[in-house]
Amino acid sequence: MENSEKYRRRRAGAVVVIAAVAFFLHAAAGADAESESELHSVRPGDTLWEIATENYPSTDDPRVTVEEIRAENGLDGYTIRPGEVLELPDWQAASEADTDKREVERRASPPLE
């Protein structure tokens, strides 16, 4: 009888551990999910540069942010029209792209002597 009790406890413990691991994996997958983009309705006189500088931290390079906005919306050029609705990428994603770009530029630049 003692062995069957020990077996039951081990099995119950294993079920609890598996459930906990499954919960944490599910929670982690949700944390990596893409955050929702913000929508911006283009007004007369708006430019991509202006939208980038008004909606993202001033520490970000607006050139990179403009390119992120273009990519997010499938824009071929830089022309936007009033009434158009643009999807603005998450500012953290744009900031990471800016950091990546600076790292590539730093590696491509010859060292100063």
Image (cartoon, helix red, strand yellow):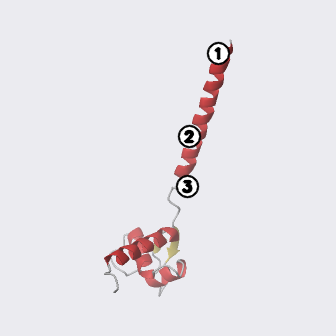
Residue at 57% x, 40% y is 21
Q: Which residue is mark 2?
A: 22
Quarter of the image with the C terminus is bottom left
Residue at 37% x, 69% y is 74
Residue at 48% x, 68% y is 93
Identify the amino acid type marked 3: Ala
Whichever of callouts 1 and 3 sits on the residue coming sooner in the sequence is 1
Q: Position of residue 71 (x, y in %)?
A: 38, 70
Q: Vertically, is 94 above or below 43?
A: above
Mark on residue 31?
Answer: 3
Report helix, strand or loop for mark 3: helix
Q: Which residue is mark 1?
A: 4
Label 1 vs label 3: CA separation? 41 Å
Check if mark 3's residue and mark 2's residue have beta carbons within 8 Å. Answer: no
Crowding at dot 2, Cα within 10 Å, few <14 / some 14-19 / many 20+, comes out as few
Q: Position of residue 80 (x, y in %)?
A: 41, 80
Whichever of callouts 3 and 2 sits on the residue coming sooner in the sequence is 2
Identify the amino acid type marked 1: Ser
Identify the amino acid type marked 2: Ala
